[in-house]
Image (cartoon, coloured by chain):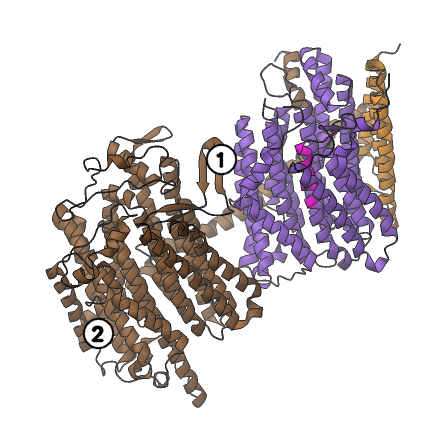
Amino acid sequence: MENFFDLVPLVVLFPLIGLLINLFAGKQLGERGVSIVAVGASAMALLVSIVLWLAQVDTGFGAVVVDAPLLGTWIDIPSAGVEIGWQFRVDTLSVTMMLVVTGVGTLIHLYAVGYMHGDEGFPRFFVYMNLFLVFMLVLVSGNNFLMMFVGWEGVGLCSYLLIGFWFDKPGDEGWKNSDAARKAFIVNRIGDFGLILGVLLTFWTFGTLDYYVPDEEPIPYHHAEHEAEPLFTPDITGVDGAESHAVSGPMGVFNQAETWLTEGDHRVEFGTVSIKFEHMLTVITLLFLLGATGKSAQIPLFIWLPDAMAGPTPVSALIHAATMVTAGVYMMVRANVFYHASETTSFVVTMIGATTALVAGFIALGQWDIKRVLAYSTVSQLGFMVTAVGVGAYTAAMFHLVTHACFKALLFLGSGSVIHGLEHGHHHVAHGEHDHDDGFDPQDMRFMGGLRHKMPLTYWTYLVGTLALAGIIPFAGFWSKDEILVDSLKLGLDDGRLDGYLGFGMLLAAAAFTAFYMWRQVSMVFYGEPRHAAAEHAGESAPVMVWPLMGLAFLSAVIGLINVPSGFPVLGWLYGEHQFANWLEESVTYAHGGEFNWLLATIAVALALAAIYVARTIYNDRAITDLERDPLERLSPRLAQAFALSNAKLYWDEVYFAFVVHPYRRAAYTLAERVDWYWWHDFVHERVIYGTFNRVTRLLTDVLDLKIIDRAFLRSAEAVRVAASRIRRIQTGYVRTYALSVLFGALLVTIIILYPVLRDLLGI
Amino acid sequence: MVPLWMYLVVAAALFSTGLYGVLARRNAIAILMSIELMLNAVNINLVAFWRYQKPGDVSGQVFAAFVFVVAAAEAAVGLALIIAIYRRRQSVIAEDMNLMKW
Amino acid sequence: MFEVPSLSDLNIAATLPVMSLVLGTCILLLADLFVPQERKQLTAWLAVAGLGVSLALSLLSLGDVTRFGDGDEAFAGMFVADTFTDAVNVIALVTALLGVMVAYNYLERTGTQRGEYYVLLLFTTAGVMFMGAAGDLVVVFVALELLSIPLYILSGFRRPQEASEESAMKYFLLGAFASGFLVYGIALIYGATGTTGLHDIWIAVDDIVAGDATSQYLLLIGAGLMLVGLGFKVAAVPFHMWTPDVYQGAPTSVVAYMSVAAKVGGFAALLRVLAAGMPHFVLDAGAPAAWQDTVWLVAVLTMLLGNLVAIVQNDLKRLLAYSSIAHAGYVLLAVAAAGSAGLADESAQAVVIYMMAYAFTNVGAFSVVIAVEKDDASNTGVTSMRGLARSQPWLAAAMALFMLSLTGIPLTAGFVGKWFVFKAAISADLFFAVVVGAVTSLISAYYYLRIVWYMYFEEGDGEAVIPWPLAAAISIAAVGTLFLGVMPYLLTDMAREITLAFGG
């Protein structure tokens, strides 16, 4: 089945074709046609991904590099030895990402057909969505960092376009949407700057950007006995079989890095400065991390993601929960060889990830907007993944990425269904009564309640998603979150690393927050009595929206079983132990399977259940009577303070505004006003350039013309007067000024070209 | 026999006269005539060089013929343009054309 | 003493691409008389047909599918038919095709629908092609006039509009003045070498270098004066002053065409004369050619002045005029590089690549100006771009692309062009000029992106008229700009084949 690998360009091509059709014929096709094309394109890409997956299984996880057809070499500068190709890489990691992107993507496309029904931008929406798939798939399937960067920028663009999709809504809302889009774009630029610097440094260091060159086997990291061997020391030479993998000839960056690390004492020449290779790796990985903090919304750049919820809900589900925001995690896992080598970076990564998980989890506690809660939850869960990368648990990071894609997409789509239902109900009410201007907001949870009976299917699927996110056994989130916790604690215990302990502690607290805010949300939305007329009249959404919910709910329930940790009773025997880790190991050098730890699992689940219980008690059916105050605030003044802090998002935006945005604006204003206008325009242009030119031409015409005229009119005083009047007139004639300039140029050229000869003649 | 340099000096003088005319005259037709003077100076040069350096090869002479053919073509187009402008503005003064500047 | 060459000696077949165009143009001149006034668009179609035939022939020749005639010469060496000729032909013809497309509706709506427009445009194109093929200074001179004289008329084509007439007048007077310098320079070169054939000059230069001082002076001044004449055509500083006025006053469809065509011709001739004719003209053994310093100094001046003055322009056409001055500076850098030993071919390739990129980009940019221009030639200010992104998103996107390409942002054709030009200049050790080039292209980002800013971030009507031929032209230009930028190897592979028949 190896020939099937050559199909990989199709995975990008199908969405591309879909978007082109919709772009040029969208208006003619109508909603039905557009949906068929867009969903069909996405489904075809999914089909190709599945074929690639089967081919992988069939060939024993063989990794191949496939040249993109027709495109040829992208950058080819033989003199500088630069050659960067349009190449796809099919290995277990990229196929995993392709399956997630196309699988979740297809379900969300399907859902969006119902959600966007009747919107005047219907074709435009699906063009953007397919374009997003194109770039995302380029990002995950490329064989070099530059293709990753192309995809990276492309998904950023699509994100920008889709967040601001409703930029033309009347009034402030349109402005708000486009502001959110710009915020996302600008904040991401900072991260992208880091990434491109990192890519350039990588190129400087290695002379190539390819992950692996074609036909090159990754140098494996042997860990025959997981339990016995210390996990976090690279060990290549001593292990049997390493020699047989010794690579000769051109190498991709990762094998080159392994080789240099093994040999030791490699230095990178940077002009006159020579840097130790290990230090260079630290710099590169830190720059990559900056990129990841932008795209994957980590501290300090996470502020754009909550605002990004201004986009349509399917966009939030696909781009801002399931796929694009995980690009940073994918990138770091792809570069696991680099990250593994640098302890400094690992420490920073762990701290950033764990802090983000905790802070975002805390902020999520105090939000009223149903989508904002989920947005902060996403930031928090991305923090989990980043922490996993930091502690070296690359399998766990990818595992959590996969499960999170399923249940977070489910939750977002569920919230979309709720919003849709509420809007529907509000329409109903508004038509019946006259008094409907009561500040109603279909996304505000305070106007909800009691939806369990109005929207049963949405409720049940939402519940599955909540349990999965909260980490209740046996739903998907339990398995992946548990693995991250185990691995970070293990890093602390085995290696005595501080970041292991710290990460573990913070993540455990964040996990408790997760269970709490999710159950708070479920309580406010689905339980109790309706608190607004709209909620009373809400109805279940269309089947085309509910089916994807059920599909995702099924996945959220069972997908954890792909990676049952070793030592887990019955299930491990039934499904095989850490299958996913085995699969991933083929392409991620430092991936390893997780172990099961009874104690830890019990503590984590108990903590989550306790948090759910507390949430259920506080937000019971009768608790929310006052729209202005949260039940939490009524418990004690201290809790009220904490809630206020959380509700205000820890004043993060305000701090940014005071310390970054405001000074920047003032500097820009000063530059514009003082430098550009007063100095550049008024002074330099008007006075210096214009004035000098006038003076110079006058001088030249004076001198030249006087001489000529002197000769012609025999130096008579009369002639000088005539000349003077002529000179005046010459300055008014524009054509002749120009002609004079040509003459001036001719003299200049003649003098310059004769200069060497003249110099010799005059003996200067 | 008159030496070559004399011809060259005459040509250079004629060229300079034309140059001066272009720079000093206000009348567009006069400017055009001055340009013709410059081209004629070139013709003197060409023919002189031909006669003194390569009398066996006619290319200098041929070139001179090309130059005055081109000069005639330029004059035709130029006079047509000047007439078009004169009809509209009743003026052939180059200075009057200053609609576009800076 | 004088042999009449036989017809087979002339090797006329080698001139097929340009000859077919000249022939087609003559037929068009006659045919136009029989086309009724209300159906003048037929003339445009005939012009496209003529250009198409010639383009097909040029492409066949460039792609080495067929060779017309045998050897590199025709007309006893007066006409050179090498790969450089083919490349210049292709650029000139593509530009002319775009030029016809943008004029198709523009002439009609501005009330200047006259058939001779296309005839003149085709004659100019033939002039450009002859300049690229020049093997003799006579051909350089005649081709220059064939290129220029129709352009003088085209500039004033919008009579009786004052601005158009004025621009024609200025262009004509100054153009004739500059060609006086050019032909004086030719006369001096003839005096120094005793020949006007570039191949013979190439051979004679070696003797002069070794020989007497008088000939050296004559040749030096001659080369300098030729640089003046051709520098005027390509709008190099300080021979540039006509450019903004003419670009502003002339009909925009003419400007779109001539801003590229005149430059292609000028640079082709500069390369023929300097790089092919006198690359060995050194004053000290081992030094670069004697004209190199002058050319790069002019290039530096041009880059500086063009980019600086463009910043304060508020009329789009004037702004693009200064921008085209600036771009002439970049190309001159490549021409200067040809003065170092062994770099003639690389420089020729860089010039071809740059001009190809520039052709698409600049014609595209002017086409957008045509789209927003009103029938009375107003609304060409920078502010007319306001709000274009909302009312005409595709047009705005194309304009943004052209602006990025003119700035030289990667993934656009402009970047590829700059890359090769700078590379050639670095190979020739012209570091100072390259630094100036890099700095000035940074400066240029200011005024190019200002237009993008107006389109995307300022409110305005953003009115534009885009009939289908114009839309097609803009699309071709945009696709070309993007295509060459994303897949530069197509162009560079083609360019690698380009060599000058002699010289270097």
Same chain check for tags 2 and 1: yes
Left-right relation of A221 to C225: left
In depth, the one of A25 and A45 nearer the eye is: A45
In depth, the one of C466 and A107 nearer the eye is: A107
Q: Residue furthest front?
A: A1
Colour of chain C in the image = purple
Circle 1 sits on which residue?
A77
Circle 2 sits on which residue?
A632
Colour of chain A in the image = brown
Tell me the CA gap for discs 2 and 1.
Answer: 64 Å
Q: Residue at x 18, y 35 (%)?
A: A238
SS majority, magenta = helix
Per the image, is A104 magenta?
A: no
> Start and end of the magenta stretch?
C79-95
Residue C30 image offset from top left, x and y in percent? 87, 48
Which quadrant, please, contains the N terminus of chain C? Answer: top right
Q: Which chain is orange?
A: B
- Determine if residue A625 is in view: yes
Amino acid type shown at disc 1: Ile
Left-right relation of B64 to C482: right
